[in-house]
Image: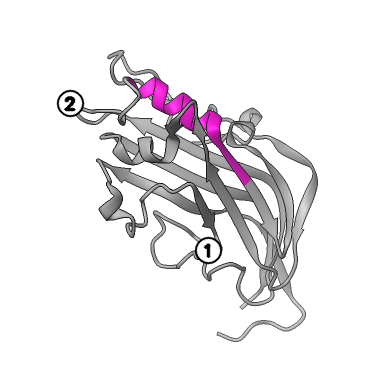
Amino acid sequence: MAKVLGLREQRVQFFYDTDFAYHGVLTSTDSSNVNFAKAQKNLFSDARAGDLLRTNLQGPGQLLSDQTFLTFAVRHEVMFYNVASSATYGDTFTSLAQLSIWTMNTCTFQFQVDTKVEFEGPITMTPAGGGPWGFVSESGAPLITNGEPDAPSIYVLPLPIAITKRQAIAMIEKKYSFGGTDIAAEINAADCGKLLRAYIDGYNTRDVQ
């Protein structure tokens, strides 16, 4: 469909990509699996359209056409949940709480636009501000998320980060070893539901068709 020349529309729309969304154990033989947790993953840069569970970016590494974006918040959705009575939490951790806390406290991000890192830090500083929330009566199956699902939980940037036409974007997710424990390996070895997703939230400007 042809675009309307000289007319643009602005919408409030976040973009997201997924590090992992899986239930069950993954081993080194599964390293090609898109849900395999690694020490570093570059989200958005290799996003593929067609699977909204993973991403809503339409092309790898950039917005399509002449779209621009003003980023007012970076958000991370982190969730681990016990969906089996026999669940295990890696080779070191003995509870879902330990796996959740150490994952959130040893993972960092770098939001990169073009060739520059625009914003970086631990993912605990960029809570989801959305997603499941509640209390599970069984102490062995708690629900632990990165932030409560309400607007005050979102860390809003004092100044927006601008993404201009056809600029490359990437969210570089890093998982560190801590006290001799390889966090990425623990995530893969955990026999539970697990999810890590990154968002950029703000104003998207695009052509009118």
Q: Residue at x 71, y 52 (%)?
A: 71
Q: Residue at x 75, y 41 (%)?
A: 157
Residue 194, given in percent of the width and then of the height, sits at 36, 38
Of residues 166 and 201, the one nearer the viewer is 166
Q: Rate crowding at label 2 as few (under 14), some (14 to 19) or many (20 or more) other CA atoms within 10 Å.
A: few
Residue most extreme to the left: 86
Q: Which residue is mark 1?
A: 57
Q: Amino acid at mark 1?
A: Leu
Confirm whether residue 62 shows in the render: yes
Count up the numbered dots: 2
Confirm whether residue 203 shows in the render: no
Magenta span: chief secondary structure: helix
Q: Residue at x 45, y 42 (%)?
A: 196
Of residues 18 and 116, the one nearer the viewer is 116
The magenta stretch spans which residues?
95-109
Residue 98 in magenta? Answer: yes
Can you tell which of label 2 and label 1 is closer to the viewer? 2
Of residues 193 and 31, the one nearer the viewer is 31
Residue 67 in magenta? Answer: no
Query: For the residue labelled by badge 1, is the local secondary structure a helix, a strand or a loop?
Result: loop
